[in-house]
Structures are given as structure tokens and as C-alpha cells.
Amino acid sequence: MSIDSLRRDVISAIDALKGELIGISHAIHSEPEISLQEFKASARLADAASEHGMAVTREAYGMPTAFATEFGKADGPTIAILSEYDALPGIGHACGHNVIAAIGYGAAVALSKIGLPGKVRYLGTPAEEAHGGKELMARHGAFDGVDAAMMIHPANMNLMTMPTIAVADVEAIYHGKAAHASAMPFRGLNALDAVITAYSSIAQLRQHIRNSERIHGIITDGGMAPNIVPERAACRFFIRAPDVHDLTVLKKRVVACFEAGALATGCRLELKWTGADYLDLKTNWPLAEEFQKHAEALGRQFFKMEDIPQGFAGSTDMGNVSHRVPSIHPMLAVAPSDVIIHHPDFAHWAAADAGDQAVLDGAKALALTALDMMADTHLLVRVKSDFAASAELSRLAVQEVSHQHHHGGCGCC
């Protein structure tokens, strides 16, 4: 069967799935679940895939809310298609992962309906907003034997790729000594003072870091009552840098600020690094260009990457995948340009008409890109060559994040 015929079959399959895909997107949107708690969303996708004849493995690759299935021709290229589905605390799907979930599912189901010249590994990847689910899955072999990996993220514009930087997530907990704040303050060790000292130190540090670096955080525990010297206080910070090597240096400077808080107050410092550090995204440009071509054919107009303002970047655990195998992470507009990701208004748009259209366009463009990767040997060579050009740097980045004794993680934007 010709590639043109396969493309038509894929488009037809997704058109036939329209109601189901939008229904899945809305259902996941209506029941937001935060990282590592996405039991309903994971089951919904896995059950639906099973109904289409896929043999689904649940609790896949060491993650209770992950799943995996494979199908296609074993001796052709293997393409991993990913679905995310975790939500944000308090503001639901303000990052639009319901759209990501439905896009990946739609592309995978459509490809399962045709005679493929390669193989698809469809993965449900939880805990992107925290804990670094893809890194944890990768350590269990989720991307072993994969020739390329791909997913799509919703945004307020169409982009060939997501601008990203590396990130770590740390909680600093101070343990002091309680006392009556008026009668006997001299008997206490004030854990809140330790947090404030550390916070102020980090605020001062921020004046002397690169424009490409970010440090931002919140106080999560400030004590129990004004008349009790706080014996426990805590704060949580994200630390971001262009790549894992710069991130390692910046983390040490932030840790020194935390240590200053403990030293100044006599409190004991406990650091908790959460999940896995997120690497910068290594976009495979031949594959990204192929995706953009298909999306433009569907009527999408793309914002030029060179016109993106400096510092406009988030983080994603897809970066960890991209340093292991050739990867793309394009973005499709679901909201007006003045509505940004991680704002409550974005959650509305993720289940509105524009979000639904992104589900259909995204599933088609993603499936067509995967199909081209399987069928076009010249594209396959270009994709592998592009990845190989910086393979040693990627190997060192993966080695750095895989052998950490403590880990970090964050949300995508």
C-alpha cells in the first residue's frame, strides 16, 4: 500500500474517532488528578485502547498510573507516542494535559487501524507536573529500542517546539524548637526565621545569576500560631538553568542559601529533592519540520521560533526523553495569545472548541509524522544524524540525571 493511501486512511480513522477523542479530552478535563494520582485518567485511556484491540500493560515501567502497548511491524522503526494526563493543584487542567492525552490516544488508535511499515509504542506517561514520570519510566526501559518519541503540548500559539530549560525542585524544611514567643522566646529556635533568611538570601542571589536562569519558590509552612516560636517551617523552590551542567552549579549556590538559614538560627536543615531533574529539550529538527509541514497542511500557522522573547521558557520531563532518543514536542494553540499556560483561564480553553480542534489536528499531524518516520528511509537517516551530532553531550546529561543521589522536578511551564 502506498504512503499516500496510508495517510488518507489515518486521516479517515481520526475523523471517525472525533466524538470519542473529544469525549476523552472532556472527561479527563472534568476530573483533574494531580501527579501520581491520575488513576481515573490512566484507566480511561487504557480501557479505551483495549476496546480498540490493543494489548495494554497497566502499571507499566514502574509507575502505578502509567500504561503501555505496542503494535505494528516488528522489523521497522519503532515510534513512541506519548500521552500526559496529570493536572495542576488547585487550577485543574490549566496546562491542558487532557488535550495531550487525547492527541496521543487518537494518533495511536488511528495508526493501529492500518498496515504499518513500522511499530508504535503508545505510552501513558504520568507525573509530568511533578516527580518526572518520564525519567522514572526511562530508567525502567520505557524508551529502549525506540527510534523516535513524540508528543504535542497545547499553548497560546503554534510552535515547532517548546522552548525549555532544565529544572530541579527542592523543599527545604527547618526544624527548630518551640517556646512561648512572649514569656520565653530565648528558649526557642525559630524555624520561620530560618526560612525567611534563606528566602532573602535567594532573593539576593537572583540579582547575580544569568538571564537564562531562574529561581522561584513559596513558603509552604510558617508555623502554627503567632505566640509560639515555630519549631517547623518549610519552603519549596524551583531552580532552572539552560542545561543540566549549569543547573548543577546553580543548585549548589541555592543550597548555600538554605544552609545560611540554618546557620543563622541554629535550626536543623532537611532538604528534599523531588522526583527527577528535568533536562532541557533536545529537539530533533528534521522530525519537527516534518510535523510542522503536516500541521500547516491542516491550516495551522506557526510562530517563528527566532521571534520568541528571551527567557520565554518552561520545563518538561520530555527533555529527559529527548536526550535518549530523537524527540519532538511541538505546541498547538488552544487559547488566545494573551491567555498563558498555568493560568486558570487556560483550563477553560483546554476544553473549549479550540481545544477540541487541537485534539483532532494534533492527532492527525502526530500520526502522519510517525508514519513518515516509518516509511521514509531518508527521513530516518536525517533524524538519526541530527541526534548523533550531539550524542556525547546527551550521554553525559543522561548520566548526570540518572546517577543523582537526590532528584528534582517541576511543571512544564
Image (cartoon, rainbow, N blue to C red):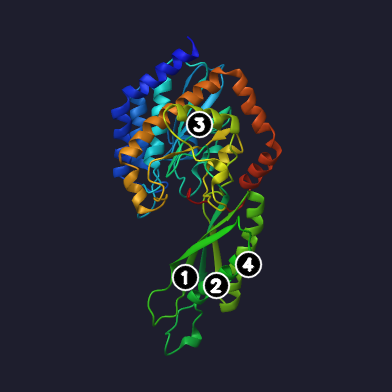
Residue identified by numbered label 4: 256
Q: Mark 2: give few (<14), some (14-19) or many (20+) Cα within 10 Å.
A: some
- Can residue 297 be seen here? yes
Question: Foreground: 308 or 393?
Answer: 308
Residue 190: x %, y % from top left:
49, 78
Q: Quadrant of residue 221?
A: bottom left
Q: Secondary structure at mark 4?
A: helix
Question: Foreground: 192 or 411?
Answer: 411
Do labels 4 and 1 touch, CB within 8 Å? Answer: no
Q: Mark 1: give few (<14), some (14-19) or many (20+) Cα within 10 Å.
A: many
| Kind of residue at badge 2 | Ser
Residue 335: x %, y % from top left:
37, 44
| Kind of residue at badge 1 | Ala
Q: CA distance from mark 4 to mark 3?
A: 44 Å
Q: CA distance from mark 4 to mark 1?
A: 18 Å
- Can residue 113 be seen here? no
Mark positioned earlier in the residue sequence (4 or 2): 2
* Position above or below: 280 against 1: below
Q: Secondary structure at mark 1?
A: strand
Q: How many marks?
A: 4
Do labels 3 and 2 touch, CB within 8 Å? Answer: no
Q: Which of the two discs, 4 and 2, sits closer to the camera?
A: 2
Q: Secondary structure at mark 2?
A: helix
User: Which mark is on residue 233?
Assistant: 1
Q: Which of the two discs, 3 and 1, sits closer to the camera?
A: 3
Residue identified by numbered label 2: 200
Residue placed at 53% from the left, 50% from the top?
A: 313
Mark positioned earlier in the residue sequence (3 or 2): 2
* Position above or below: 279 against 219: above
Q: Mark 3: give few (<14), some (14-19) or many (20+) Cα within 10 Å.
A: many
Q: CA distance from mark 3 to mark 1?
A: 48 Å
